[in-house]
């Protein structure tokens, strides 16, 4: 009986351990929010991830519709949060590209847009 219980628990534990081991840092949420429209250009873009980030290898780039950078270029990382200051900008669609290296040594990247205007 004990033998059967042990063989039933071991696969479950392996499945749980494997799920944690292959998890990568993914974007949890952002401010301004993904796809959201804001009245005025925010002073900074902040992204939150599901894992702690490695500061030296994690970046955010924010561009306007013409492809011009509107971020200050210096990404700040604290734990699982990453921010970059933004220059003032007018109405329009802004593109955010991010790339992170998480504590599990895997890189992930992504992009999204937000809008400024009425």
Image: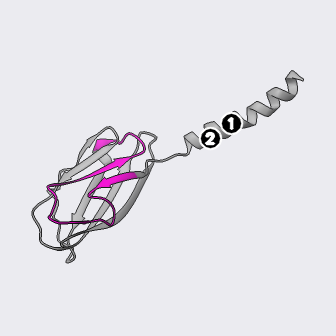
- In the displayed orientation, state which residue is furthest to the left: 88
The residue positioned 17% from the left and 66% from the top of the image is 39
In magenta, the rendered stretch is: 28-55
Q: Name the residue under label 1.
A: 14
Residue 33: quadrant of the picture: bottom left
- In the displayed orientation, state which residue is furthest to the top: 2
In this rendering, would 76 be left or right of 10?
left
Query: Is mark 2 in CB contact (under 8 Å) with mark 1?
Result: yes
Q: How crowded is mark 2: few (under 14 residues within 10 Å), some or many (20 or more)?
A: few
Instruction: Tell me, for residue 18, which label it has, or none.
Output: 2
Secondary structure under tag 1 reads: helix
In this rendering, would 11 be left or right of 73?
right
User: Which x, y percent locates residue 111?
Assistant: 35, 64
Is 45 magenta? The answer is yes
The residue positioned 60% from the left and 43% from the top of the image is 19
Q: Residues within 10 Å of mark 1 (few under 14, many from 20)?
A: few
The residue positioned 33% from the left and 66% from the top of the image is 35
User: Which x, y percent locates residue 75?
Assistant: 22, 49
The answer to whether 56 is drawn above or below residue 27 in the figure is above
* Quadrant of image for the N terminus: top right
The answer to whether 118 is drawn above or below residue 16 in the figure is below
Disc 2 to disc 1, how far (Cα)? 6 Å
In this rendering, would 108 be left or right of 59?
right
* Quadrant of image for the C terminus: bottom left
In this rendering, would 10 be left or right of 114?
right
Secondary structure under tag 2 reads: helix
Which residue is at the front of the view, 33 or 62? 33
The answer to whether 43 is drawn above or below residue 88 in the figure is above
């Amino acid at each position: 009986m004990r033998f059967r219980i042990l063989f039933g628990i071991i696969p479950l534990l392996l499945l749980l351990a494997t799920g944690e081991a292959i998890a990568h840092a993914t974007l949890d949420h952002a401010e301004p929010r993904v796809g959201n429209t804001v009245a005025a250009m925010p002073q900074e873009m902040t992204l939150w991830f599901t894992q702690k980030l490695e500061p030296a290898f994690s970046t955010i780039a924010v561009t306007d519709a013409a492809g011009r950078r509107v971020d200050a270029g210096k990404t700040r990382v604290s734990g699982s949060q990453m921010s970059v200051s933004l220059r003032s900008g007018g109405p329009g669609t802004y593109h955010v590209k991010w790339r992170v290296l998480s504590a599990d040594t895997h890189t992930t990247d992504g992009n999204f847009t937000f809008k400024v205007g009425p």
